[in-house]
């Protein structure tokens, strides 16, 4: 029996040492030390021993039990430590590792340009106003000194709706609405979408965007117009050459258009029709007739107005040679901004 116990101890120690995980270790414990384990089986035959032998074998069996329990405990601690070390290794956070790439969106170049222009005017003391895109002929033409038989109505091919209202051809209609509702002094800028019956080309689109500017007060002169627009142009285009050119609009007198040198640097290209210049805005002193339509006294107040093409400015700022790219939603194009 002594030999049996020694053999069992040897065998169990080897099994314990070789156990590589906790569940296997537990099975070994049950196999050798459990109620129906191998040690119990040996002790079960103690009855066959002589009374003198029993205490000796009993003591030896107890020693084997203590040795195996202690070995099991050691191996358990060892395996648990290993498992924790392994978990820590796996869960380690490398704070120096580069983060995952998260693509970020950004504003459309038209939005960026609009915001820049509005920021400049707000900085000059203007407030932002808006108006409806579906207009009556009165606000879009008549009150802007453009009666039905006026040749300028042909200049702007208009899109009419069935009820006789129009898709506004210019943000200037908001001038009238704002002046009807407010008294001078007035300083507003009006961003918005406008519509013309036009064939889409690289320079023209039937839908485009303007920012209208209106200042009305006593003693406003053409110098205020030129000074304000010069600040705008210098903020937007820096040193790039610009020119004021006499023009005609029904609702301003005198009137001027402003050209900015094309991004071909004046050499001439298809975008500027080989002139070297791109017109970006129309402007002028508010016609006294317009003031009469809104009930202002033209003897008392003067004003200037300007309408800026946001697409043209965007094309000039970014060197875009086709207006249609701005509406295409082509991500290969948009990603560049
Ligand atoms: Zn050009």
Image (cartoon, grey):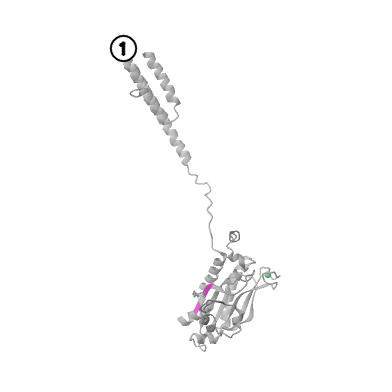
Residue 333 versus residue 265: which sits nearer the camera?
Answer: 333
Ligand 1 shows up in the quarter that is bottom right
Residue drawn at 53 percent across, 68 percent down:
115
> Position of 323 compared to 77: left or right?
right
Is residue 189 on the magenta stretch?
Answer: yes
Estimate the x, y position of residue 283 in percent, counting from the top left. 58, 79
Per the rendered image, the range of residues in magenta is 186-192
Residue 274 falls within the magenta-colored stretch: no
The residue sitting at 55% across, 71% down in the picture is 117
Q: Residue furthest bottom?
A: 299
On the question of residue 337 being in view, the answer is no
Name the residue rendered at 48%, 39% in the picture.
Answer: 89
Task: Give the residue drawn at x 45%, y 25%.
Answer: 18
Magenta: main secondary structure equals strand
On the image, the x and y values in percent for residue 214 come to 53, 79
In the image, residue 66 above or below residue 281: above
Position of the C terminus by quadrant: bottom right
Q: Residue 82: x and y, percent? A: 45, 33
Q: Using the image, determine if residue 70 lies above or below residue 299.
A: above
Quarter in which the N terminus is drawn: top left
Please give left or right for residue 319 compared with residue 62 in the image.
right
- Tell me the element at label 1: helix
């Amino acid at each position: 029996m002594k030999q049996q116990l020694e053999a069992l101890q040897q065998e169990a120690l080897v099994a314990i040492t070789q156990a590589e995980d906790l569940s296997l270790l537990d099975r070994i414990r049950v196999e050798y030390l459990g109620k129906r384990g191998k040690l119990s089986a040996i002790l079960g035959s103690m009855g066959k021993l002589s009374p003198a032998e029993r205490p000796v074998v009993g003591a030896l069996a107890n020693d084997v039990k203590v040795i195996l329990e202690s070995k099991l405990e050691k191996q358990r601690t060892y395996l648990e430590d290993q498992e924790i070390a392994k978990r820590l290794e796996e869960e380690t956070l490398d704070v120096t590792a580069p983060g995952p790439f998260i693509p970020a969106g950004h504003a459309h170049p038209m939005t960026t340009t609009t915001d820049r222009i509005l920021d400049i005017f707000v900085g000059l003391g203007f407030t932002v106003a808006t108006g409806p895109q579906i207009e009556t002929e009165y606000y879009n033409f008549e009150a802007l000194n453009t009666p039905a038989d006026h040749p300028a109505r042909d200049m702007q091919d208009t899109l009419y709706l069935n009820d006789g209202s129009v898709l506004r051809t210019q943000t200037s209609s908001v001038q009238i609405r704002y002046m009807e509702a407010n008294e001078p002094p007035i300083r507003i800028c009006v961003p918005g979408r406008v519509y013309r019956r036009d064939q889409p080309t690289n320079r023209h689109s039937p839908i485009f965007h303007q920012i209208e500017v209106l200042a009305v007060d006593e003693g406003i002169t053409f110098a205020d117009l030129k000074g304000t627009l010069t600040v705008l142009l210098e903020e937007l285009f820096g040193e790039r050459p610009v020119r004021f050119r006499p023009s005609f609009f029904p609702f301003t007198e005198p009137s001027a258009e402003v050209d900015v040198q094309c991004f071909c640097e004046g050499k001439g290209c298809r975008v500027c029709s080989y002139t070297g210049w791109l017109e970006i805005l129309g402007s002028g002193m508010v016609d006294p007739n317009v003031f009469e339509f809104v009930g202002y006294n033209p003897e008392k107040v003067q004003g200037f107005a300007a309408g800026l093409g946001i697409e043209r400015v965007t094309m000039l700022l970014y060197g875009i040679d086709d207006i249609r790219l701005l509406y295409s939603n082509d991500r290969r194009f948009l990603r560049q901004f």
